[in-house]
Amino acid sequence: ALITNLPLPAPASRRVRFLVHRQHYLERLEAHDAAGALACLRERLAPLEQPHFALPPPDGCAAIAAAGGGDGKSGNGGVTVAGREAAPSAMARCGAGGGGSGDRSGDGDLGGARLGGSVQELSTYLLCRSVEELKARSGWDGGGGASRRLLLDELQEHIPPSLLLPENRLETLLQQAVRWQTLHAPPLTPDDVSPSLFEDVSFRHDGLPREASLVLEGHADEVWCVAFSHSGAALASASRDGAIVLWNATNPQFARRALIPAHSGAIASVAWSPDDTLLLSCAADRTVKLWNCPAGGCAATFREHTEAVTAVVWLPSGAHFLSSSSAGKRVILWDLGGNALQSWHGPRVTDLAVAADGARLLAVSGCTVRSC
Protein backbone atom coordinates (compact mmCIF):
# COMPACT_ATOMS: atom_id res chain seq x y z
CA ALA A 1 0.00 0.00 0.00
CA LEU A 2 2.83 2.38 0.80
CA ILE A 3 4.42 1.83 -2.61
CA THR A 4 1.09 2.33 -4.35
CA ASN A 5 0.54 5.66 -2.59
CA LEU A 6 3.91 7.12 -3.55
CA PRO A 7 3.39 10.18 -5.83
CA LEU A 8 5.43 8.81 -8.72
CA PRO A 9 4.95 8.99 -12.49
CA ALA A 10 3.24 5.90 -13.87
CA PRO A 11 6.37 4.33 -15.46
CA ALA A 12 8.44 4.85 -12.30
CA SER A 13 5.63 3.50 -10.13
CA ARG A 14 5.43 0.32 -12.22
CA ARG A 15 9.21 -0.19 -12.03
CA VAL A 16 9.26 0.34 -8.27
CA ARG A 17 6.39 -2.07 -7.64
CA PHE A 18 7.93 -4.66 -9.91
CA LEU A 19 11.27 -4.53 -8.07
CA VAL A 20 9.64 -4.86 -4.64
CA HIS A 21 7.29 -7.68 -5.67
CA ARG A 22 10.16 -9.49 -7.38
CA GLN A 23 12.12 -9.47 -4.12
CA HIS A 24 9.05 -10.78 -2.27
CA TYR A 25 8.58 -13.50 -4.89
CA LEU A 26 12.18 -14.70 -4.59
CA GLU A 27 12.02 -14.70 -0.79
CA ARG A 28 8.85 -16.83 -0.92
CA LEU A 29 10.71 -19.33 -3.11
CA GLU A 30 13.64 -19.32 -0.70
CA ALA A 31 11.21 -20.05 2.16
CA HIS A 32 9.80 -23.04 0.21
CA ASP A 33 6.45 -21.27 -0.07
CA ALA A 34 5.67 -22.15 -3.67
CA ALA A 35 2.00 -21.27 -3.32
CA GLY A 36 2.82 -17.80 -1.95
CA ALA A 37 5.40 -17.27 -4.68
CA LEU A 38 2.94 -18.33 -7.34
CA ALA A 39 0.29 -15.97 -5.94
CA CYS A 40 2.77 -13.11 -5.98
CA LEU A 41 3.74 -13.94 -9.55
CA ARG A 42 0.13 -14.11 -10.74
CA GLU A 43 -1.49 -11.32 -8.71
CA ARG A 44 1.33 -8.78 -8.27
CA LEU A 45 3.97 -9.20 -10.95
CA ALA A 46 1.94 -10.30 -13.96
CA PRO A 47 -0.43 -7.28 -13.97
CA LEU A 48 2.58 -4.97 -14.17
CA GLU A 49 3.63 -6.61 -17.44
CA GLN A 50 0.25 -6.76 -19.12
CA PRO A 51 -0.76 -6.63 -21.91
CA HIS A 52 2.53 -8.09 -23.10
CA PHE A 53 2.31 -10.97 -20.67
CA ALA A 54 -0.89 -12.73 -19.55
CA LEU A 55 -1.28 -15.56 -17.11
CA PRO A 56 -3.93 -18.28 -17.50
CA PRO A 57 -7.03 -18.37 -15.30
CA PRO A 58 -6.43 -18.98 -11.60
CA ASP A 59 -7.63 -22.58 -11.77
CA GLY A 60 -4.92 -23.44 -14.27
CA CYS A 61 -2.14 -22.15 -12.06
CA ALA A 62 -3.65 -23.69 -8.96
CA ALA A 63 -3.19 -27.05 -10.58
CA ILE A 64 0.54 -26.50 -10.54
CA ALA A 65 0.58 -26.12 -6.76
CA ALA A 66 -1.66 -29.13 -6.42
CA ALA A 67 0.69 -31.20 -8.56
CA GLY A 68 3.38 -30.74 -5.93
CA GLY A 69 1.29 -32.29 -3.19
CA GLY A 70 -0.97 -29.40 -2.25
CA ASP A 71 1.48 -27.57 0.01
CA GLY A 72 3.72 -26.21 -2.72
CA LYS A 73 6.73 -28.27 -1.59
CA SER A 74 8.49 -31.07 -3.39
CA GLY A 75 9.02 -34.40 -1.76
CA ASN A 76 12.79 -33.95 -1.61
CA GLY A 77 12.72 -30.64 0.31
CA GLY A 78 13.38 -28.39 -2.72
CA VAL A 79 11.23 -25.58 -4.05
CA THR A 80 9.87 -27.50 -7.03
CA VAL A 81 6.12 -27.06 -7.28
CA ALA A 82 5.49 -29.73 -9.90
CA GLY A 83 6.86 -33.09 -10.81
CA ARG A 84 9.56 -33.29 -13.43
CA GLU A 85 7.02 -34.51 -15.96
CA ALA A 86 4.16 -32.19 -15.07
CA ALA A 87 6.24 -29.02 -14.78
CA PRO A 88 6.94 -28.35 -18.46
CA SER A 89 3.32 -28.41 -19.55
CA ALA A 90 2.07 -26.56 -16.48
CA MET A 91 4.71 -23.86 -16.71
CA ALA A 92 4.06 -23.52 -20.39
CA ARG A 93 0.51 -22.50 -19.50
CA CYS A 94 1.48 -20.25 -16.57
CA GLY A 95 4.64 -18.74 -17.97
CA ALA A 96 4.33 -18.55 -21.72
CA GLY A 97 1.00 -16.87 -22.26
CA GLY A 98 0.77 -15.39 -25.71
CA GLY A 99 3.19 -17.97 -27.13
CA GLY A 100 6.32 -15.93 -26.43
CA SER A 101 9.74 -17.55 -26.28
CA GLY A 102 11.38 -18.36 -22.93
CA ASP A 103 14.02 -15.64 -23.23
CA ARG A 104 11.60 -12.80 -23.99
CA SER A 105 12.32 -9.82 -21.74
CA GLY A 106 8.76 -8.58 -21.52
CA ASP A 107 8.42 -4.86 -20.89
CA GLY A 108 12.16 -4.39 -21.01
CA ASP A 109 12.18 -1.43 -18.59
CA LEU A 110 11.18 -3.21 -15.40
CA GLY A 111 14.82 -3.66 -14.42
CA GLY A 112 17.01 -6.51 -13.15
CA ALA A 113 17.79 -8.66 -16.18
CA ARG A 114 19.85 -11.13 -14.14
CA LEU A 115 17.24 -11.46 -11.38
CA GLY A 116 14.43 -11.69 -13.89
CA GLY A 117 13.30 -8.79 -16.00
CA SER A 118 10.04 -10.44 -17.03
CA VAL A 119 7.35 -12.55 -15.44
CA GLN A 120 8.14 -15.35 -17.86
CA GLU A 121 11.75 -15.50 -16.71
CA LEU A 122 10.75 -15.29 -13.06
CA SER A 123 8.27 -18.13 -13.52
CA THR A 124 11.08 -20.47 -14.57
CA TYR A 125 12.57 -20.20 -11.08
CA LEU A 126 9.61 -22.27 -9.83
CA LEU A 127 11.31 -25.27 -11.42
CA CYS A 128 14.42 -24.97 -9.23
CA ARG A 129 14.82 -28.08 -7.07
CA SER A 130 16.71 -26.31 -4.27
CA VAL A 131 17.50 -22.89 -2.89
CA GLU A 132 21.08 -23.28 -4.10
CA GLU A 133 19.86 -23.85 -7.65
CA LEU A 134 17.56 -20.81 -7.36
CA LYS A 135 20.46 -18.58 -6.28
CA ALA A 136 22.78 -19.99 -8.94
CA ARG A 137 20.28 -19.44 -11.76
CA SER A 138 19.08 -16.00 -10.68
CA GLY A 139 22.29 -14.51 -9.27
CA TRP A 140 20.31 -13.63 -6.13
CA ASP A 141 22.04 -14.18 -2.76
CA GLY A 142 18.95 -14.61 -0.60
CA GLY A 143 16.86 -12.48 1.71
CA GLY A 144 19.57 -12.55 4.37
CA GLY A 145 22.31 -11.45 1.98
CA ALA A 146 22.88 -8.16 0.21
CA SER A 147 19.75 -8.44 -1.95
CA ARG A 148 17.68 -5.98 0.10
CA ARG A 149 20.43 -3.40 0.10
CA LEU A 150 20.80 -3.82 -3.66
CA LEU A 151 17.03 -3.47 -3.96
CA LEU A 152 17.23 -0.16 -2.11
CA ASP A 153 19.93 1.00 -4.53
CA GLU A 154 17.68 0.11 -7.47
CA LEU A 155 14.70 1.87 -5.93
CA GLN A 156 16.69 5.06 -5.47
CA GLU A 157 17.13 5.23 -9.24
CA HIS A 158 13.36 5.67 -9.62
CA ILE A 159 12.25 7.40 -6.40
CA PRO A 160 13.28 11.05 -5.93
CA PRO A 161 15.39 11.97 -2.86
CA SER A 162 12.45 13.92 -1.43
CA LEU A 163 10.62 10.59 -0.96
CA LEU A 164 13.54 8.23 -0.34
CA LEU A 165 16.74 9.59 1.19
CA PRO A 166 19.87 8.24 -0.50
CA GLU A 167 21.88 5.74 1.51
CA ASN A 168 24.39 7.31 3.94
CA ARG A 169 22.95 10.75 3.21
CA LEU A 170 23.52 11.99 6.78
CA GLU A 171 27.12 10.83 6.74
CA THR A 172 27.65 12.58 3.41
CA LEU A 173 26.21 15.83 4.75
CA LEU A 174 28.45 15.69 7.82
CA GLN A 175 31.52 15.08 5.67
CA GLN A 176 30.57 18.01 3.44
CA ALA A 177 30.18 20.26 6.49
CA VAL A 178 33.63 19.33 7.78
CA ARG A 179 35.12 19.83 4.30
CA TRP A 180 33.50 23.27 4.02
CA GLN A 181 34.93 24.35 7.37
CA THR A 182 38.35 23.02 6.38
CA LEU A 183 38.34 24.91 3.06
CA HIS A 184 37.19 28.20 4.58
CA ALA A 185 39.19 28.14 7.79
CA PRO A 186 42.72 29.58 8.05
CA PRO A 187 45.59 27.17 7.33
CA LEU A 188 46.09 24.78 10.23
CA THR A 189 49.36 24.59 12.10
CA PRO A 190 50.66 21.25 13.44
CA ASP A 191 49.33 22.15 16.90
CA ASP A 192 45.81 23.00 15.69
CA VAL A 193 42.90 20.62 16.11
CA SER A 194 41.09 19.55 12.96
CA PRO A 195 37.67 21.14 12.38
CA SER A 196 34.86 19.51 14.33
CA LEU A 197 31.09 19.61 13.94
CA PHE A 198 30.67 20.03 17.69
CA GLU A 199 31.25 23.77 17.20
CA ASP A 200 31.57 26.24 14.34
CA VAL A 201 35.03 27.25 13.20
CA SER A 202 35.57 30.95 13.88
CA PHE A 203 37.75 32.72 11.34
CA ARG A 204 38.17 35.94 9.42
CA HIS A 205 39.02 36.49 5.77
CA ASP A 206 41.85 38.97 6.46
CA GLY A 207 44.17 36.09 7.43
CA LEU A 208 45.63 37.99 10.39
CA PRO A 209 46.78 35.84 13.32
CA ARG A 210 44.67 36.06 16.45
CA GLU A 211 46.94 34.29 18.94
CA ALA A 212 50.63 34.71 19.74
CA SER A 213 52.76 31.72 18.75
CA LEU A 214 55.95 33.09 20.33
CA VAL A 215 56.82 35.73 22.93
CA LEU A 216 60.29 37.33 22.83
CA GLU A 217 61.66 38.62 26.10
CA GLY A 218 64.91 40.52 26.52
CA HIS A 219 64.15 44.16 27.29
CA ALA A 220 63.96 45.83 30.69
CA ASP A 221 61.23 48.30 29.70
CA GLU A 222 58.51 48.88 27.09
CA VAL A 223 59.38 47.88 23.53
CA TRP A 224 58.60 50.79 21.22
CA CYS A 225 59.60 49.55 17.77
CA VAL A 226 60.60 46.46 15.81
CA ALA A 227 61.93 45.98 12.26
CA PHE A 228 62.68 42.91 10.15
CA SER A 229 65.72 43.01 7.90
CA HIS A 230 64.92 43.06 4.18
CA SER A 231 66.00 39.41 3.84
CA GLY A 232 63.82 38.43 6.77
CA ALA A 233 66.76 36.70 8.46
CA ALA A 234 67.07 39.16 11.36
CA LEU A 235 64.80 41.16 13.64
CA ALA A 236 65.71 44.30 15.58
CA SER A 237 63.68 45.44 18.58
CA ALA A 238 64.22 48.70 20.47
CA SER A 239 62.94 49.78 23.84
CA ARG A 240 62.33 52.58 26.21
CA ASP A 241 65.28 51.22 28.16
CA GLY A 242 67.63 52.51 25.39
CA ALA A 243 68.67 48.99 24.29
CA ILE A 244 68.50 47.23 20.93
CA VAL A 245 68.13 43.45 20.72
CA LEU A 246 69.01 41.60 17.51
CA TRP A 247 67.15 38.31 16.98
CA ASN A 248 67.86 35.41 14.63
CA ALA A 249 64.64 35.17 12.59
CA THR A 250 65.79 31.97 10.87
CA ASN A 251 65.56 30.16 14.19
CA PRO A 252 62.04 28.93 15.07
CA GLN A 253 62.51 30.30 18.59
CA PHE A 254 64.11 33.58 17.39
CA ALA A 255 67.33 33.08 19.33
CA ARG A 256 68.88 36.32 20.56
CA ARG A 257 72.02 37.37 18.66
CA ALA A 258 73.04 40.51 20.53
CA LEU A 259 71.94 42.96 23.21
CA ILE A 260 73.18 46.47 22.43
CA PRO A 261 73.05 49.25 25.07
CA ALA A 262 72.53 51.79 22.31
CA HIS A 263 71.21 55.05 23.80
CA SER A 264 70.81 56.87 27.08
CA GLY A 265 67.18 57.66 26.27
CA ALA A 266 64.16 55.82 24.88
CA ILE A 267 64.62 54.61 21.30
CA ALA A 268 61.89 55.81 18.92
CA SER A 269 62.84 54.11 15.65
CA VAL A 270 65.23 51.63 13.98
CA ALA A 271 65.84 51.06 10.25
CA TRP A 272 67.87 48.48 8.29
CA SER A 273 70.05 49.55 5.38
CA PRO A 274 69.05 48.20 1.93
CA ASP A 275 71.78 45.51 2.12
CA ASP A 276 71.01 44.64 5.79
CA THR A 277 74.60 45.27 6.89
CA LEU A 278 73.84 48.46 8.86
CA LEU A 279 71.17 49.50 11.33
CA LEU A 280 70.12 53.04 12.21
CA SER A 281 68.59 54.02 15.55
CA CYS A 282 67.33 57.32 16.96
CA ALA A 283 66.34 58.20 20.48
CA ALA A 284 65.29 60.76 23.03
CA ASP A 285 68.96 61.49 23.76
CA ARG A 286 68.94 63.67 20.57
CA THR A 287 71.26 61.34 18.64
CA VAL A 288 71.16 59.05 15.65
CA LYS A 289 73.50 56.07 15.71
CA LEU A 290 74.74 53.70 13.02
CA TRP A 291 75.41 50.05 13.92
CA ASN A 292 77.33 47.31 12.15
CA CYS A 293 75.37 44.08 11.87
CA PRO A 294 75.36 41.40 12.95
CA ALA A 295 78.22 42.24 15.38
CA GLY A 296 76.38 45.24 16.81
CA GLY A 297 79.30 47.64 17.05
CA CYS A 298 78.64 51.39 16.76
CA ALA A 299 79.96 52.73 13.43
CA ALA A 300 78.99 56.41 13.87
CA THR A 301 77.00 58.83 16.03
CA PHE A 302 75.18 61.80 14.46
CA ARG A 303 74.62 64.87 16.66
CA GLU A 304 72.76 67.71 14.97
CA HIS A 305 69.27 67.59 16.43
CA THR A 306 68.48 69.75 19.44
CA GLU A 307 65.45 67.72 20.55
CA ALA A 308 64.49 64.06 20.72
CA VAL A 309 64.83 62.30 17.35
CA THR A 310 61.59 60.53 16.41
CA ALA A 311 62.24 58.84 13.03
CA VAL A 312 64.96 57.62 10.66
CA VAL A 313 64.66 56.24 7.12
CA TRP A 314 67.15 55.11 4.48
CA LEU A 315 67.27 56.32 0.88
CA PRO A 316 67.28 53.46 -1.67
CA SER A 317 70.96 53.94 -2.52
CA GLY A 318 72.02 53.07 1.03
CA ALA A 319 74.46 56.00 1.00
CA HIS A 320 72.15 58.54 2.62
CA PHE A 321 69.37 58.65 5.20
CA LEU A 322 66.88 61.08 6.74
CA SER A 323 66.10 61.80 10.38
CA SER A 324 63.37 63.91 11.95
CA SER A 325 62.73 65.57 15.30
CA SER A 326 59.13 66.22 16.21
CA ALA A 327 59.78 68.72 18.97
CA GLY A 328 62.63 70.33 17.01
CA LYS A 329 60.45 70.57 13.85
CA ARG A 330 63.42 69.60 11.73
CA VAL A 331 64.26 66.98 9.04
CA ILE A 332 67.93 66.37 8.14
CA LEU A 333 69.53 64.57 5.18
CA TRP A 334 72.77 62.76 6.13
CA ASP A 335 75.53 60.85 4.45
CA LEU A 336 77.33 57.96 6.16
CA GLY A 337 80.29 60.17 6.91
CA GLY A 338 78.25 62.08 9.48
CA ASN A 339 77.69 65.17 7.33
CA ALA A 340 74.32 66.96 7.48
CA LEU A 341 73.83 67.66 3.79
CA GLN A 342 70.51 69.46 4.01
CA SER A 343 68.01 70.52 6.64
CA TRP A 344 64.31 71.47 6.54
CA HIS A 345 62.36 73.34 9.18
CA GLY A 346 58.58 73.11 9.34
CA PRO A 347 55.81 71.30 11.22
CA ARG A 348 56.35 68.53 13.74
CA VAL A 349 57.27 65.27 11.96
CA THR A 350 56.78 62.04 13.88
CA ASP A 351 57.52 59.49 11.14
CA LEU A 352 59.06 59.22 7.68
CA ALA A 353 58.81 56.88 4.67
CA VAL A 354 60.62 56.87 1.31
CA ALA A 355 59.31 55.22 -1.88
CA ALA A 356 61.30 52.25 -3.18
CA ASP A 357 62.55 54.31 -6.16
CA GLY A 358 63.40 57.28 -3.95
CA ALA A 359 61.08 59.60 -5.90
CA ARG A 360 58.72 60.41 -3.03
CA LEU A 361 59.05 61.19 0.67
CA LEU A 362 56.12 60.92 3.09
CA ALA A 363 56.10 62.73 6.43
CA VAL A 364 53.58 62.17 9.21
CA SER A 365 52.61 65.45 10.85
CA GLY A 366 49.78 65.50 13.36
CA CYS A 367 46.60 64.32 11.63
CA THR A 368 48.09 64.62 8.14
CA VAL A 369 50.54 62.83 5.87
CA ARG A 370 52.64 65.20 3.75
CA SER A 371 54.15 64.12 0.43
CA CYS A 372 57.38 65.62 -0.85
Image (spheres, helix red, strand yellow):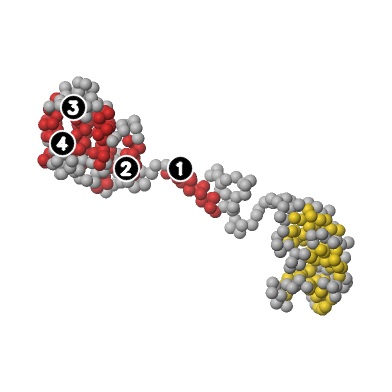
| C-alpha span from label 3 to label 4 | 14 Å
Rendering coords of residue 7 (x, y %): 29, 46
What element does badge 4 sit on? helix
What residue is shown at x 71% (from left), y 75% (from top)?
358
What residue is shown at x 70% (from left), y 51% (from top)?
252
Answer yes or no: do the residues labelled 2 and 4 have beta carbons within 8 Å?
no
Residue 46 at least partly seen: no
Answer yes or no: do the residues labelled 3 and 1 have beta carbons within 8 Å?
no
Label 2 or label 3, whichever comes before in sequence order: 3
Q: Quadrant of residue 225?
A: bottom right
Picture layout, residue 358 above or below residue 210: below
Answer yes or no: do the residues labelled 2 and 3 have beta carbons within 8 Å?
no
Q: Quadrant of the N terminus?
A: top left
Q: Report the disc number at residue 95.
A: 4
Q: Which residue is mark 3?
A: 81
| C-alpha span from label 2 to label 3 | 30 Å
Residue 2 at least partly seen: yes
Q: Which residue is mark 1?
A: 171
Residue at the extreme top: 75
Q: Report the disc number at residue 154.
A: 2
Picture layout, residue 199 above or below residue 57: below
Nearer to us: label 1 or label 4: 4
Label 1 or label 4, whichever comes before in sequence order: 4
Q: Nearer the viewer, residue 35 or 229?
A: 229
Q: How many numbered circles does the render carry? A: 4
Give amino acid for label 4.
Gly
